[in-house]
Amino acid sequence: MKGLLRLLGIAALVGFAVVVYRAIKQYREDSVFDLGATPSASGGFGGGKRSISPELLAILADPGDKGPVELVTDPSGSEWLVNRRNGFRYPVEDGIPIMLLEEGEKNRDESLISG
């Protein structure tokens, strides 16, 4: 009887160890995809300024006329997506374009229109 209890105790410990091992392994795999763990330019994690990827920029279109937009950085360091056909410019915040017609109309700049 004592031998059976010892065997059950050892089996329980091994089972617990397997569960803990799998939980740690799953946590490490999931942590690879965390957005907060992106190294910034200053060497730390998070808080760095992100920009739009070239792949995303290639597929973005103005919501009004469905034409292409271009990425422009102003002297203050702010990024904008500009539609040179109507002068609308859309803000980019932390690498995320705010492509709403209201934002484009609000930030319209006549000097950006190319003839």
Image: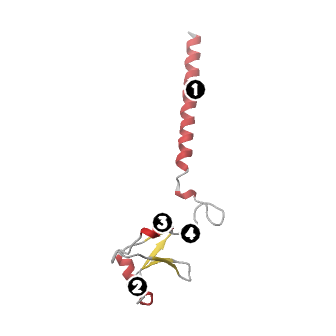
> Are circles 3 and 4 on residues that touch, CB within 8 Å?
no
Which numbered disc, 2 or 1, marks the residue that appears first in the sequence?
A: 1
Report the residue marked by disc 3.
55
What separation in Å lies between label 3 and label 2 (alpha carbons)? Answer: 23 Å
For label 2, the SS is: loop
Where residue 82 appears, x then y in whole percent? 44, 79
Q: Which mark is in front, 2 or 1?
A: 2
Mark 2: give few (<14), some (14-19) or many (20+) Cα within 10 Å.
Answer: some
Report the residue marked by disc 2.
87
Amino acid type at mark 3: Glu
Which quarter of the image is occupied by the N terminus? top right
Which numbered disc, 3 or 4, marks the residue that appears first in the sequence?
A: 4
Report the residue marked by disc 1.
14
For label 1, the SS is: helix
Q: Which mark is in front, 4 or 1?
A: 4
> Are circles 2 and 1 on residues that touch, CB within 8 Å?
no
Amino acid type at mark 2: Gly
Mark 3: give few (<14), some (14-19) or many (20+) Cα within 10 Å.
Answer: few
Which numbered disc, 3 or 2, marks the residue that appears first in the sequence?
A: 3
Which numbered disc, 4 or 2, marks the residue that appears first in the sequence?
A: 4
Q: In this view, does 115 lie above or below 82?
A: below
Report the residue marked by disc 4.
49
Mark 1: give few (<14), some (14-19) or many (20+) Cα within 10 Å.
Answer: few
Where residue 79 appears, x then y in whole percent? 51, 76
Which numbered disc, 4 or 1, marks the residue that appears first in the sequence?
A: 1
Residue occupying the point 40% across, 85% down: 87
Q: Between 66 and 73, which is closer to the camera in this rendering?
A: 66
Where residue 48 appears, x then y in whole percent? 58, 66
